[in-house]
Amino acid sequence: MPIARRTALLSGFNLLLGGGVAMLTTACSRAGAATAAAKEHFDVEMTDDQWKAKLSPQAYAVLRHEGTETPFTSPLNSEHRKGTFTCAGCALALFSSDTKFDSGTGWPSFWQPLPNAVNKRVDNSLGMSRDEVHCRRCGGHLGHVFDDGPRPTGLRYCMNGVAMGFTPA
């Protein structure tokens, strides 16, 4: 789908649902997926209360309950310095700034993760099948990957900025 069309569709979706309602709706509809993820074992594991204490409410909703931040709200959209994007849950290096691009979707996008940084699982929520991306080390939900990105991979890792941090080079 061309970026302009994707942006128009996302804008319409955002108007229909509204910012906070979109996050809540997504988080509620993904409760089954969050339960499935909780059964997996990761190098970094904490109780739900420990995650709540560590993360902001927005990061907690996204990372631990597979919510989605409102598009065009993340400061990481306009982060253009050389450096590394890390997991907000466990600080694992996820993406190099060299692979970041402006997808026009309102979320930080990358065409490739760092080696051994992320895992994927099928997400059948919201009446569609997508590939969900999560942190390999803590299992935190990061976003989704689509096959409409730029060369050389043709992939678009569409990540929630609130699920990541940035470390300048």
Image: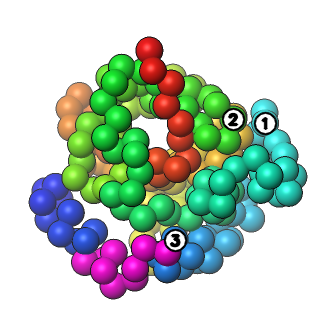
Side (left or right) of 111 relative to 20: left
Q: Which mark is residue 132?
A: none
Name which residue type carries label 1. Answer: Val
In the rendered structure, does residue 89 fall within the stretch colored magenta? Answer: no
Residue for point 49% across, 31% down = 166
Task: Specify which label sits upstream in the sequence, 2 or 1.
Answer: 1
Residue for point 61% across, 54% down = 59
Say which quarter of the image contains residue 112: top left
Packing grade of label 1 (10 A; few <14, some 14-19, many >=20) is few
Does residue 154 appear anywhere in the picture?
no
Residue 40 position (above or below residue 58): above
Query: 112 or 101: nearer the eye?
Result: 101
Residue designated by label 1: 44
Q: Position of residue 68 (x, y in %)?
A: 50, 63
Q: Residue furthest top?
A: 169
**Does the residue at mark 2 contact the one at mark 1 (Cβ under 8 Å)?**
yes
Task: Provide the residue span drawn in magenta.
Answer: 12-20
Side (left or right) of 107 relative to 39: left
Q: Position of residue 92 (x, y in %)?
A: 62, 29
Name which residue type carries label 3. Answer: Met
Residue designated by label 3: 23
Residue for point 30% across, 80% down = 15
Closer to viewer: mark 1 or mark 3? 3
